[in-house]
Amino acid sequence: MKKILIVDESSLFRDYLAKKLESSFEVVQGSSGLDAIVKMRNEVPDLVIMEYYLSRKSCMEVLQEKKEDPNTAPIPVIIVSGKLDADAIKELAQNGIKKIFTKPIKLDVLLNTVGEIFNVSVDIDETPCIIEAHFNDEIMFLEIAQGLNTEKIELLKYKISELLQLYDVKAPRVLIMLSSIELTEKDSKKLELLLMTVLETGRTKGKFIKILTNSPFVREFVTSRPEFSDIGVTDNLNSAMDDLLGLKPDSYAHDEVVQDKLLRTTTPRNGGEQKESFQLRFEDEKKVSPMEKLESIGGRQVSIAIVDDDLVIRELVKTIFSETDWETVVYENGKEFVADTGKRKFDLVFLDLMMPEMNGFQVLQYLREKKIEFPIIVFSALSHKETVVKAVVGFGVHSYLIKPLKPEQVMQKAVEILGRNF
C-alpha cells in the first residue's frame, strides 16, 4: 500500500483528507515544517501533500532539506495553500512541485490528482448535490439542492467546524433548506448522515434545528426517529423564521433591517478572515455546457414566458434562447401575463418578483387560486435569498436566479427544470 504524508497545521484539514484516503493508502500526518522533515526521513512516503505556510520550518526550507537527502528527493509533492504571489509560485516550480492547489480546494480534483499519480481510482460519491452554508450571528443556514451526496455531507462536517471556530458560536440555531430537493426511501442513510452531522458537529440540540421542506418522506423520517424527534419540520418559511428567531411571521420579507440582520454573512467575531480548506462544490458543477444537455429534453417544442418589467432582461433572456427553436413570449408586467394564462400553456416561466402593477408574488398567488401550474424560475434583484425562498417554498417555485443574470446560469437552470418535466 502506497504511503501519503499530509502536512498541515489545521487538524480539520488533515483529519478529513486522511479519512478520504485511508481506504486506499497508508496515511501519515504532520503538523509543522519540522514535523514534515522528520516524517519524510523516517516514513519515506510515496507522496507528500503539504501546506505552504508552516511553522517551525518554512515550506521552502522543507523542500530544500528534502532535495538534499537522496532518500527523500524523489518524493512528489503537492502544495496546498491560500493565495500565493507570483514569486512564491515561481520558486515552488523550480523545486519540482507536482501541483499547487489553492484553498478552498475542490476535493474531487485533489483526489483525482492523487489517483493519477499512483494510477489508481479513488472512489467518490458522484450524486449531484450543491450545499451552501453561511452564518448570521448565531444562525446557520444550510441550503441543499439537487440531491444528497455522501462526500458533500462529510465535507459539511468540516465546514461547520470551521464556521463554529471562525464565529465563536457554541450552539447555533440551524435552518436546513431542502425546498428544491426530492428525497425517497433510498436516501435514508444519507439523510440520517446529514442530520447527525448537524447535531453532532454543530453541537446543538434538535429543538434548535428546523428543516424547510415540502417532502412527506422527510417529515415522516424525522418524526419517526427518536434521535431526531425534536427537530422541527415545516413547509412554511414564516413559521421556521418565527420559531428560530422569534420574529413575527411576515416581518422577515418586508423589513430591510431584518433582512440585513438575518441574511448577510456576518464578520467573524475573532476579527480574522474567513479561511476555508475545502469547497462544497466539485469541479464539474462550475462547468456549464447546457446546449449539450438539450438532448435530455427529447427534441420537443418548448414554450417559454419571460415576465419582467426590465426591457434589458427580457431581451437578454430571449437572446440566450435564440440558439434554440424554442418559442419565447415576453410580458412587461404580471398583469399582462396572467391575462394570457387562460389562452397559453408554457413549459417554463421566468418571473421577476419586483414589478409595477402586479408583482411576482401576486402572480404566484393568482396562479395558485386558479390552480394553474407552470414550472417557474423567479428572478430577483434582491441579494437576500430567504425572500426568494418565500416564493420557492410558499408557492412551489422550482428555482431562482439573482440579478444581474449570467447567460450560462439562465440556460443551465432552464435545462435542469425542463429536463425534470419532460
Image (cartoon, rainbow, N blue to C red):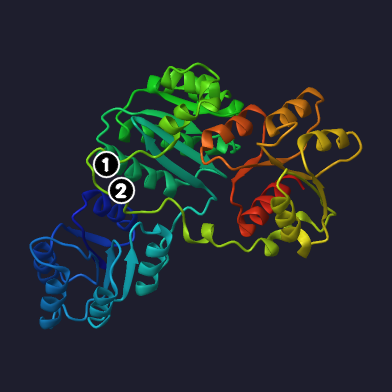
Relative height, residue 335 to residue 92 (above, below): above
Q: Position of residue 104 (x, y in %)?
A: 35, 56
Q: Is residue 291 above or below residue 192?
A: below
Foreground: 379 or 184? 379
In this rendering, is residue 70 above or below 60?
Answer: below
Q: Is residue 49 left or right of residue 181?
A: left
Residue 304 picture location, percent across and down: 79, 48
Q: Is residue 288 left or right of residue 116?
A: right
Quadrant of the drawing holding the N terminus: bottom left
Taking depth in this image into account, of 203 and 261 the one nearest to the observer is: 261
Q: Return the disc, 1 or 2, that comes first in the chain's sequence.
A: 1
Q: Evaluate whether residue 158 shows in this view.
A: yes
Mark 2 and mark 1 in contact (Cβ < 8 Å)? yes
Q: Secondary structure at mark 1?
A: helix
Q: Nearer the viewer, residue 320 or 110?
A: 320
Picture layout, residue 285 above or below residue 59: above
The residue that appears at 38% across and 22% down in the rendered structure is: 208
Task: Report which residue position mark 2 lands on.
Answer: 274
Residue nearer the viewer, 234 or 313: 313
Q: Can you see residue 1?
A: no
Give how far apart the Cα atoms at labels 1 and 2 are. Answer: 7 Å
Question: What label does residue 317 carry, if any?
Answer: none
State the image quarter where residue 141 is shown.
top left
Secondary structure at badge 2 equals loop
Find residue 166 and name its label: 1
User: What amino acid is at disc 1?
Assistant: Leu
x, y percent for residue 373 = 78, 33
